[in-house]
Amino acid sequence: MNPKEMMSVLRNSYVSGKTRPLEYRIKQIRNLKRMYLENKELIIDALAADLHKCRHESIVMEIMFLINDLDNILANIEEWEKPEVPEKPLVNVLDKLYIFNDPYGVVLVIGAWNYPFQLLLMPVAGAIAAGNCVVLKPSEIAKNSAKVIAELIPKYLDTDCYKVYNGGVPETTALLKERFDYIFYTGSSGVGKIIQEAAAKHLTPVTLELGGKSPVYIDESVDMNIAVRRILWGKLANAGQTCVAPDYVLCTKDVEKKFVEISKGVLEQWYGTDASKSPDFGRIINDAHFRRIERFIKSGTIAVGGNTIASERYIEPTILIDVKPTDPVMMEEIFGPVLPIITIGNLHEAIRFINEGEKPLAMYIFSRKKLDVKVLINNTSCGGISVNDTIMHLTVDTLPFGGVGNSGMGQYHGKYTFDTFTHKKSCLYKNLGALGEKLGQARYPPYNERKTRFLNILLKRRSPISFDFIRYFVAFGLGAAAIYMYYNSRSFIRRT
Ligand code: NAD
């Protein structure tokens, strides 16, 4: 089916109202969950074939992540979908106000290769929950995962409303010519610009989940054994091919020395003396990325690691020191298991360094000094932060996940995904009663001073009327009435 035919099927399904009932959406979400549970091994095998991803990471960072998200949707969808009732200004005291949670229509979700299931199917679940029809575009680079997705989705989801479209750049380019009601893209900042340009032709809103160089700041106050473990884990999961992986470290020369020493022991403990033999360490997705990352190892001095095996696309966990900000490893997002350390003199130099670059997707601060943490947070801009850890902020589904500036726009996870695929449709519901009409008379011509004054008073911005205020007001009124009646009855008794 070409993009045009596919869009025509989806458009008709959307217009028919098929995706609107809550029961329908819940059924699709349950089917998606069944898909993960019944095909766990197939998914694990595809991830192993594409990325040498180990079983543990496939289960924890892809399958469980997706299932937990679906459980959260199932637990909350009824609440999320309900029209919201906002507070009323005084002028609307006789009216009803609603915010309806409307689906956008037919949406496109484009996934990336590094977490090929999670990055595509998590936004898709939110789009389905919000009542949209969806085109799923897996990354062609993780080809085994893309094949599994194309095989499974039609078996579990309604094919009239959800369609997988596989292919590379020409196919995605053709797809982008169609008019979508929303586009959700995950991938590089370069392609993000192409997506936004294509979307602009139809004024289609977009979420762009992009990447960048996420810095780590460490000072001497931390327990270095803990800090090193948390940083290396974030860097080496999926062989460094994680959008929020720590990209580089900023620390003093003293901290660098300790960091390097402890890292050697930790890496041996995790992967043995030869990480290429470890079942827990991944491989680079393809030859082009392998060559790109291998080139970075020539920056600065190798303090740890540095070996590569081209035939396996293996790059040993590597730490680089004596790195200059102008070295190739610092000129683009690394997206591999290479960690350069840039030495700085103090916190303010770190802040300056971070602010001189593009806004990163994540920032990591390791420090016990609360004031320094606050200063760093307040004086830099990034998508999100973990303090004294890496990556973990994105596992909290009550925190929005997304970038800023060059690292993206928009956010998702938990309710934020549902909201991303939802248009907030405002509704003012007036009644046709005589009192409302009387109060509204002042807006009709012929205008005069009195009408202007009256409207000024009526429309003047006040705090919304809260229930507390009404409660106190009524209680005060009743109290005043009781006192009045009490004194009135006493004077009546005296008079008689
Ligand atoms: P990729 O090559 O898989 O591209 C992503 C998608 O864009 C694919 O579906 C691909 O088909 C499509 N695409 C590629 N070139 C295109 C073109 N010219 N026109 C239209 N579509 C095109 O992935 P990638 O870009 O290599 O991903 C790596 C980047 O993504 C890194 O920068 C990483 O940080 C970022 N990333 C961000 C997140 C996030 O959640 N913010 C997650 C993962 C990856």
Image (cartoon, rainbow, N blue to C red):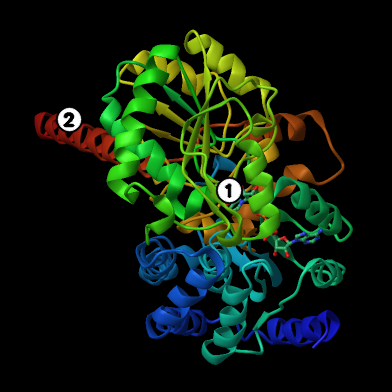
Q: Is mark 1 within 8 Å of ligand 1?
A: no
The residue indicated by pointer 2 is: 487
Q: Residue at x 51, y 54 (%)?
A: 416
Counting from the top left corner in percent of width and height, residue 331 is at 70, 32
Label disc, if present, on residue 92 of the rendered structure: 1
Ligand 1 - quadrant of the structure image: bottom right
From the viewer's side, name the closer residue of 361 and 83.
Answer: 361
Residue 373 placement: quadrant = top left
Q: Is residue 391 visible?
A: no
Location of the C terminus by quadrant is top left
Compared with residue 74, is residue 373 higher up or lower down, i.e. above or below?
Answer: above
Label disc, if present, on residue 423 of the rendered structure: none
Q: Residue at x 19, y 32 (%)?
A: 483
Labels 2, 1: front one: 1
Along the horizontal axis of the image, is 374 left or right of 4? left
Location of the N terminus by quadrant is bottom right
Classed neighbour count for the residue bearing mark 2: other residues with Cα under 10 Å, few (<14), some (14–19), many (≥20): few
Residue 446 placement: quadrant = top right
Along the horizontal axis of the image, is 440 left or right of 399? right
Q: Residue flagged by tag 2: what amino acid is it?
A: Tyr
Classed neighbour count for the residue bearing mark 1: other residues with Cα under 10 Å, few (<14), some (14–19), many (≥20): some
Counting from the top left corner in percent of width and height, residue 201 is at 89, 58
Counting from the top left corner in percent of width and height, residue 83 is at 52, 64
Q: Are marks 2 and 1 in contact (CB under 8 Å)?
A: no
Q: Is residue 315 visible?
A: yes
Compared with residue 108, is residue 231 higher up or lower down, i.e. above or below?
Answer: above
Q: Is mark 2 within 8 Å of ligand 1?
A: no
From the viewer's side, name the closer residue of 438 and 186.
Answer: 186
